Image (cartoon, rainbow, N blue to C red):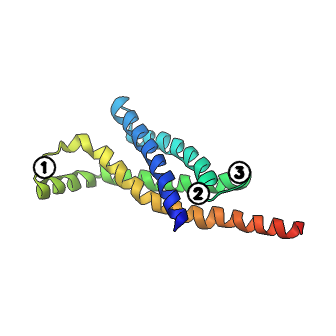
Amino acid sequence: MKEFVKYFIVGTFAALLDFFTFSFLTVGLDIHYLIANVISTCLALIFSYYFTCTLVFRQKKINARRDFLPFAVIGFIGLGLQNIMLYALIDLKLAFEAVKLIVWVTNVPIDTPAYVQPLSKIFVIGVIFLWNFFMRKYLVFKRAEQQEIIRCQEQE
């Protein structure tokens, strides 16, 4: 549970970096949302890798060759899932319907088109956060921990 809280904190900062980069690229520079998503997610992935290794799972030595590839593969699968979800929410208009429902239920006027991409990105970040945590915990850092135990036993 302690790891999850630390991962949540690191993930929150990575998500903020991801979200604000995405918003700047889509709104500020008018870059297509899928391209902006790739750029913002890659920046967040690098940030997340470093701080997940050093703060969350407390790797004494960061072994980029051993750990980064599976960490990145999980991140890129997550990126693919993000792009599929963003496409469904934005191009297939699912987010428009969700925002309309929020407006109808809450009676709060929201400029639907202006909020669709950022609201969609927030939703997608939340879903992918869980994917990344569990996949990285059990496939990347559990394996690294087991290899470290084996290495220590061999040295004895």
Q: Which residue is denoted by mark 3 in the rendering?
A: 62
Q: Secondary structure at mark 2?
A: helix
Q: Earlier in the sequence, mark 3 or mark 1?
A: 3
Q: Which residue is denoted by mark 2 in the rendering?
A: 56
Horizontally, is 46 left or right of 152 in the view? left
* Percent coordinates x, y for residue 147 in the rendering: 76, 65
Question: Measured along the vertical axis of the image, is residue 155 above or below residue 73?
Answer: below
Tell us which disc is closer to us: 1 or 2.
2
- Residues 84 and 46: in front is 46
Question: Measured along the vertical axis of the image, is residue 88 above or below residue 35?
Answer: below
The residue carrying pointer 2 sits among few (fewer than 14), some (14 to 19) or many (20 or more) residues within 10 Å by Cα, namely many
* Percent coordinates x, y for residue 22 in the rendering: 41, 40
Residue 108's mark?
1
* Percent coordinates x, y for residue 47 in the rendering: 56, 44
* Percent coordinates x, y for residue 141 in the rendering: 65, 62
- Residues 78 and 149: in front is 149
Contact between labelled residues 1 and 3, with CB atoms less than 8 Å apart:
no
The residue type indicated by label 3 comes to Ile
- Residue drawn at x 77%, y 68% is 149
Question: Measured along the vertical axis of the image, is residue 138 above or below residue 95?
Answer: below
The residue type indicated by label 1 comes to Val
- Residue drawn at x 42%, y 43% is 34
Q: Point out the residue furthest to the top here.
A: 29
Give the distance between the C-alpha atoms of the residues marked 3 and 2, in whole angstroms: 12 Å
